Image (cartoon, rainbow, N blue to C red):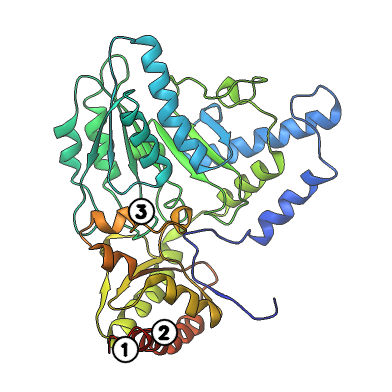
Amino acid sequence: MSKKIIYLDHAATTPVDEVVFQKMKPFFSRQYGNPSGLYALASEAEKALSKARQHVAQFLGCQPAEIYFTSGATESNNLAILGLVKRFRQENPQTKPHLITTSIEHPSVLKVMSALKKEGLAEVTFLKVSEEGIIDAKDVKKYLRPNTILVSVMYANNEIGSIQPVKEIGKIISSNKKESGYPFFHIDAAQAANYLDCSVKKLNCDLLTLSGHKIYGPKGIGALYLKEGTALSPLVYGGGQEQNIRPGTENLAAIVGLAAAVVKLKSPKAKNKQIAKLRDRLIDKTLKLIDEVKVNGNPQKSLPHIANLSFRRVEGESLVFELSDKGIAVSTGSACASKSLKPSPVLTAIGLSPIAAHSSVRFSLGRTTSKAEIDYLLKVLPKVVQRLRTIAGTN
């Protein structure tokens, strides 16, 4: 593909950073040992695994033994929720656990919660959000019950970028903990790690999810922070790796890549300011150049790189395809659900009609996004929207 792509879908995935890639390469060939072995090659692999765990722990401000490597954020979220429910039901067979989450979580949380509720394995409360996509922290306290074992809240939303008051929620849960440790607090920080402080002590969380491919690392790797004393049961059984919580031979090259990507996540303030400036330019110019455009969420209370816009009388997928023909990559929402014909649950939760939700497009910027790329988009976008409205016969 010779044509240069203007990539504005970093919330879906990010390119692997060149430094990260170089760190990974030896573990595909020369340093291919199994960390569980006893010989020299395996010992070197184990040292690399240990070092990677230390890097991730340093980023989160926790102990290395509290880091568990998984195949990604989806598995980490599933392990956190299902593992806690499984453990609680084993220890309390007569009590149905209660879980609290929000109505705009990633599918790897929402679908797990919905399945547990449907199968009668847990009671679940789905907290409503404002038009800005933010929950009221007081609602968490309001809905706590004697049998509440877990509150799971996404740090920042992947579709509209809204940032939740997780520090406040963490304080509420900490002050309502029982002697048993319940309820526990889980944060899905997959989208937030690039831009927000993920110190688990400051967040007052017991579990936290990370994803490699959202932070310029490889796909197929993630991590779960599990605070010491937070007991959960494994979902799979095997050779005992990851302290028996997530067994299976470690994907060492990917783990090293995740750690290398995490190391580069330092001093986000300057980076945030630069990306937010470009994001704001995209939004402000679009609103001036094109009629009947709505900004979804509140950019001032969201991640700096996401702009979610609804273009009235335009079908979102058609706009994505048209922009793709112009060399611009954007999406209609969550990459994990982009092939679904149903309107985005996130957009309907903040009050959009199904029609408005289907007319929405997410633009998400990244480290290498330039002013020239945004200006090219602003040159192309009005013409594409006008063309689609004309074809639809709505002008």
Label 1 and label 3: CA atoms lie apart by 27 Å
Q: Which amino acid does label 1 sit on?
A: Leu
**Mark number for residue 157?**
3
Q: Residue 124: image x %, image y %?
A: 26, 31
Quarter of the figure that contains the N terminus:
bottom right
* Marks 2 & 1, CB-CB < 8 Å contact: yes
Residue drawn at point x = 24 percent, y = 52 percent:
134
349 versus 224 height, above or below: below
Q: Is mark 3 on a helix, strand or loop?
A: loop
Depth check: give the residue in front, 343 or 276: 343
Q: Residue 309: image x %, image y %?
A: 32, 71
Label 2 and label 1: CA atoms lie apart by 9 Å
Disc 1 residue crowd, few under 14, some 14–19, many 20+, Cα 10 Å: few
Q: Which amino acid does label 2 sit on?
A: Leu
Occupied quadrant, residue 123: top left
**Mark number for residue 368?**
none
103 versus 236 height, above or below: below
Residue hosting label 1: 289
Q: What residue type is labelled 3?
A: Asn
Residue drawn at point x = 22 percent, y = 33 percent:
172
Residue drawn at point x = 56 percent, y = 60 percent:
14
